[in-house]
Amino acid sequence: MFSIFPIALVYTRQMLSICAQCLSYWKSGIDISLKTPSDPTMAKLFINTNWAHLIDMRGYDPSRYRGYTHAPAIRFSNANEQALAVDKMLDILLAAIQHFKRDDIRYIEWAINEITDNVINHSSSNVGGILQVTNMRQREQIEIVVADAGHGIPGTLRATHPEFQTDAEALDAAIREGVTRDKRIGQGNGLYGTWSICQKTNGIFSIFSGVASLFSPEEGNVQISNNSIPYSGAVVSARIGYSSTFDLSRALTFSGKPHIPTDYIDTHFDLDDSGNATFFLKNESVGFGSRAAGDPVRRKLISLLGFQDNIRILIDLSDVVLVSSSYADEVFGKLFVELGPVGFMTRVELKNVDPLVKNLIDRAIIQRMNV
């Protein structure tokens, strides 16, 4: 049995690499125990981020934390689990950040999909991968970290590119357009595109795999170094800025042509010919009885309305037979105040509302108007 005693200062990139290796040890039949930090705040961080569970699955339950800074790390082992993990992270981001532009979410989603897809298609990791997304609010950056315990990027690339004699050469090639292990599986644009997005948003991009690491702290600056301690697998970290000063409309260019990916809005909300988006409340809310359940719903609605000025949200309340007064106020009362009477009337429509629920929503709005 291994015992792990965390140090006082931790970072997502390093912690996910430890989590991935611990999962591999568990897979090999090796038990691991974790002693969380003595500092209560740090101990809570280990629980909320799901690091404790991923390291010591018997000693700690999966995290149930729902917040707006750290999302619990999610493990994925196949394409379906990967898609669910990406969707969950985007749900959290939409609730956390209310001034996203649509291009922001479009390219962040693309990067998350590409990095996690590399794990499924190329890593040969016997434990799959781990994804964590952190909202770095003060810096206006989203940090995406993906770790696995597979063959590593240098090892997978050298299977078809023997010319990369060192791990450092392989990592340098990994962020170049069109470099991939197998063209039949992918075009080799995932790491290159993610690195490009980081470059255009004053972000930071890094890879740690094998005995080499790549660090790109600013546009045009790529630092590659050899490490004395090898890492069996890969850890990819991408910090993407979402400040209003960045223009991501041409963030991805492949073979000289700009690429605009399909985004979360296209795939998760029914858009009619007029640009109206249908928002099924029963699918977007974890419950209907508290302000805590209503807060992320309202935040997500504000984010969706902010993507483009002319979008209308049709909130479908099918199968929602009861909401609490506090929930009605948290979602609809506060939304009415934030949008204003004209904005609410012109940009929000309620459909298939139970009469009792309608009365509770009307009352919440009237009370807000009289404040």
Image: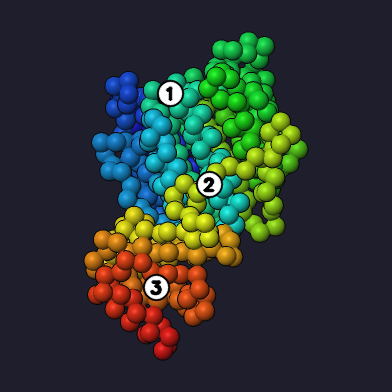
The tag earlier along the polypeptide, 3 or 2, is: 2
- Numbered label attached to residue 263: 2
Nearest the eye: 19 or 171: 171
What's under tag 2, amino acid-wise?
Asp
Neighbor class of circle 1 (other Cα within 10 Å; few <14, some 14-19, many 20+) is many
Nearest the eye: 4 or 87: 87
Q: Dot 1: what SS?
A: loop
The quadrant in which residue 2 appears is top left
Residue that appears at 61% across and 38% down:
194
Labels 3 and 2 touching (C-beta < 8 A): no
Q: Quadrant of the N terminus?
A: top left
Where in the figure is residue 207, as x and y percent of width and height? 59, 31
What's under tag 3, amino acid-wise?
Phe
Q: Dot 3: what SS?
A: helix
Nearest the eye: 75 or 192: 192
Determine which residue is flagged by label 1.
125
Tell which residue pokes out farthest to the top in this image: 162
Residue that appears at 29% across and 36% down:
57
Q: Is residue 350 left or right of residue 192?
A: left
Residue that appears at 49% across and 61% down:
276
Where in the figure is residue 56, as x and y percent of width and height? 31, 36
Labels 1 and 3 touching (C-beta < 8 A): no
Tell me the CA gap for discs 1 and 3: 45 Å
